[in-house]
Amino acid sequence: MKLSSVTSAVERAQPWLGTLVSIRVEGLALPQAHAAIDTAFAEVAAVHKLMSFHREDSDVSKLNQFAASRPIRVHPLTFTVLQIALDLSSRTNGCFDISVATQLADWGFLPTMSVGNCAPQGSWRDIELHADGSVLFHRPLLIDLGGIAKGFAVDRAMDALCSQNVRRCVVNAGGDISVSGEQAERIALDRGIPANDLPVLELRNGSVASSTGLRKASWHYGHKVGPHVHGVSRLPSPAERFASVVANRCIIADALTKVVLAEGANSRNLLQQFGATAHLYEPEGRWVHLEP
């Protein structure tokens, strides 16, 4: 019987979560490598289908339509992300808030859908999670999990790969990246503008998420706004800021980038709570390293 040889690396990419998701594995025979990647992409697809703001049949859309009138049962994966999101809201004093979708829709970053019916003073505190897996909004809200779901999908894909005894693997969902294996992955901290001297981060056995408003910034009533919102003030985070957060889990790194973009260097103590570090580029042209 002929045995399949072990490949050096297999990498594939698919469009999910509004970006291109790539998955690379090393140390498996070719059939096993592709099977592992298939399993990982299935996890990413499940998160996309459940948590997309744009899909009419997603849990997020169902909550935005009906949760202000009655409890809505959601998938356990969605419920888990909501639990983590509300915990982060509590620990950041509301700086991270999934109910900022109303502002994002008003600024043109999300489709407009019944924005006029939403309570402008609504927040994460109006989201009630029930033990039976259902969710109730205490007032009309629009939630968006775009600031946390990509990181969760990366974690789910990475867990699926690690269960297949992959020697080394990398999952990259548009800059939300997780690496498993002893060899470091070199990741350029790309702020979205041409530069010859991009800093390079070396990551092993961990996760990083990077975010900036520069690529998608637009003008709204004479003000430059990006797609990130301070959950308390409901003002846009500085569009020229760039934040890259390193943490054990990608869902945490993903969410914390939004806090660092909003709070800048004031987020240092919060990063310490999660054992995370951050590389922050300020609009005036300087890099700040934030660590516990």
Image (spheres, helix red, strand yellow):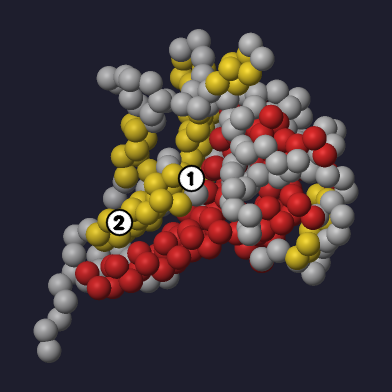
Query: Up-down: is 261 above or below 286?
Result: below
How many residues crowd mark 2 within 10 Å: few (<14), some (14–19), many (20+)? Answer: few
Q: Nearer the viewer, mark 1 or mark 2?
A: 1
Percent from the top left, x then y, of residue 64? 74, 50
Where does label 2 land, which residue?
12
* Mark 1 or mark 2: whose residue is earlier in sequence: 2
- Image location (x, y in percent) of residue 159: 47, 63
* 89 in relation to 27, above or below: above
Q: Secondary structure at mark 2?
A: strand
Work out whether residue 239 can be spotted.
no
User: Disc 1 designates what residue?
Assistant: 18
Residue 91's image quarter? Answer: top right
Residue type, mark 2 in image = Arg
Indicate the position of residue 2 as horizontal and vertical percent values.
Answer: 11, 84
In this view of the protein, can residue 121 be seen by the observer? yes
User: Which residue, as the protein is rendered here, is positioned at the far left?
Assistant: 2
Amino acid at pointer 1: Gly
